[in-house]
């Protein structure tokens, strides 16, 4: 019964709005187009409740229908992208100090809330001087705050 009342009230308000719009556009070049569109709207307004009641389709949505659950594959892609950016950051920082690398490998650990808990880096330098190794390790540890193993 509630559906019938709601449909009747909607039809009355729609008819009033259609009449007002029709009066505003009468005598203009848009009159036929506006009447066509208003006719479609009126038909849809009257037919949709009938179709819904006859077919038994309900358009109710639960909040859980739209809950986003990230895929593991996407999380791995994010983690790999973060690791690549950290590798670039380390490389740029060392190059600005005149230290060149052969290889940089970064490992990150992520908790259940998708937060990074630790970052470790393995850096292989092109020079194997003791003072360069210590300087690189200090730069990475102190300036960037990343645990590292430099060789």
Image (cartoon, helix red, strand yellow):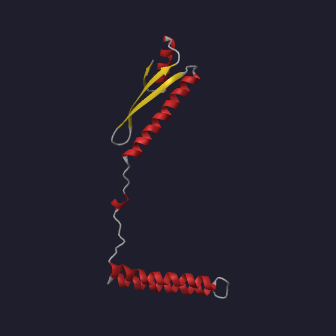
Quadrant position of the C terminus in the picture: top left
- For residue 65, side relative to residue 136 (left or right): left
In front here: 122 or 15?
122
Task: Say how many tags the image has.
Answer: 0
Q: Residue at x 57, y 21 (%)?
A: 97
Q: Residue at x 51, y 86 (%)?
A: 16
- For residue 82, side relative to residue 60 (left or right): right
Give percent across and percent down for residue 147: 41, 25
Give percent across and percent down for residue 54: 34, 82
Q: Is 122 drawn above or below residue 60 in the view shown? A: above
- Answer yes or no: is residue 72 visible: yes
- Answer yes or no: is residue 24 visible: no
Residue 92 quadrant: top right
Give percent across and percent down for residue 21: 58, 83
Q: Is 114 drawn above or below residue 119 in the view shown? A: below
Q: Residue at x 36, y 84 (%)?
A: 4
Give percent across and percent down for residue 80: 44, 37
- For residue 3, side relative to residue 139 (left or right): left
In front here: 116 or 48?
48
Residue 63 quadrant: bottom left
- For residue 147, side relative to residue 99 (left or right): left
Q: Residue at x 40, y 41 (%)?
A: 76
Residue 47 quadrant: bottom left
Quadrant position of the N terminus in the picture: bottom left
Q: Is 74 drawn above or below residue 99 in the view shown? A: below
């Amino acid at each position: 019964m509630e559906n019938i009342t709601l449909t009747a009230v909607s039809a009355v308000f729609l008819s009033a709005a259609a009449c007002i719009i029709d009066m505003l556009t009468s005598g203009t070049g848009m009159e036929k187009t506006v009447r066509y569109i208003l006719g479609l709207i009126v038909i849809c307004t009257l037919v949709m409740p009938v179709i819904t009641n006859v077919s038994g389709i309900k358009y109710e949505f639960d909040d859980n229908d739209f809950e986003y659950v990230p895929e593991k594959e996407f999380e791995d892609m994010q983690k790999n992208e973060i690791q690549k950016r950290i590798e670039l950051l380390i490389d740029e920082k060392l190059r600005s100090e005149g230290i060149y690398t052969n290889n940089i490998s970064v490992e990150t650990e992520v908790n259940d809330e998708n937060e990074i808990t630790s970052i470790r880096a393995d850096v292989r330098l092109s020079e194997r001087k003791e003072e360069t190794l210590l300087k690189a390790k200090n730069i990475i540890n102190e300036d960037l705050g990343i645990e590292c193993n430099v060789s």
